[in-house]
Structure formats: C-alpha cells, structure tokens
Image (cartoon, grey):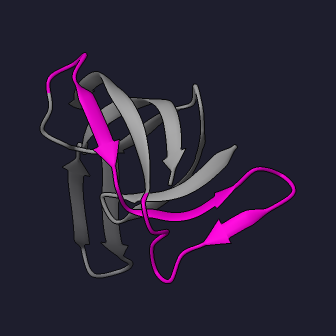
Amino acid sequence: MYAIVEAGGLQYRVATGDVIRVPMHVAEPGASYQIERVLMVGDGESSKIGRPLVEGAKVEATVLDMGRDKKVLVFKKKRRTKYRKMRGHRQDFTDLKIGKIIVS
C-alpha cells in the first residue's frame, strides 16, 4: 500500500518503512508524527483519490533526525559589467520514517 501526502508544500509518495526528508517540522527525535494531508491512497489494484484530500486517511510516522542540509550556492553574473553576487542557503529538514497508512 502506498500514499501520496503533502508535507511542507511538497508532495511525496510513501509506503510503509520509507524514510523521507521534509522541510523543518518542530518535533523531538523519536516522537510520533501524523501527516493528515493525504491526497491519494493506492494498493496496486485500486486507488482512492481525494478531492482534494482522502476522507479519514492519515499516515503515521516517527521523527528520526533534524538538522540542516548541505549549502546550496546561488551565483549571479552579468558579463562585461563587473556584476557578480554569491549567496548561500542551508535548508532545515526533518527525517521521517513512515510507520503505517491508515484509511477508514
């Protein structure tokens, strides 16, 4: 069984046992976390598509780790004008391990 969920403005296809990296959610490592924005649930033969969410469906997950990702460098340049800019950004993340997908 798999589900398509929305977390932090991004969509993920998850199944039991998967580990996903989502934008920062405030929770302690080892804590339980529920994703209630389930867009679709399927099991190979049949699927339920929400409008926009599947009623009564949720995904239970466990918080594994929190931290900051690698630095992403943004470099802008315009030729022949001596214009150069270099900026860096590090995104906060939370790793979630998917426990079970509940559909009622």
Vertical arrangement, residue 95 with respect to residue 37, above or below = above
The magenta stretch spans residue 33: yes
Vertical arrangement, residue 97 with respect to residue 47, above or below = above
Q: Look at the image and tell me whether residue 69 can be seen.
A: no
Q: Look at the image and tell me whether residue 42 can be seen.
A: yes
Question: What residue is rendered at 34% in x and 25% in y?
Answer: 62
Look at the image and give the residue range highlighted in magenta: 28-56
The residue lying toward the viewer, choosing from 91 and 74, is: 91
Q: Quadrant of the N terminus?
A: top right
Give percent across and percent down for residue 33.
Answer: 28, 36
Identify the image quadrant of residue 53: bottom left
Question: What residue is rendered at 25% in x and 16% in y?
Answer: 30
- Left or right: residue 37 compared with residue 63: right
Identify the image quadrant of residue 97: top left
Question: What residue is rendered at 22% in x and 64% in y?
Answer: 85
- Left or right: residue 55 compared with residue 67: right
Give percent across and percent down for residue 11.
Answer: 48, 61
The residue lying toward the viewer, choosing from 102 and 86, is: 102
Which residue is the extreme one toward the right?
45
The magenta stretch spans residue 43: yes
Give percent across and percent down for residue 14.
Answer: 58, 44
Give percent across and percent down for residue 45.
Answer: 87, 57
The residue lying toward the viewer, choosing from 104 and 10, is: 104
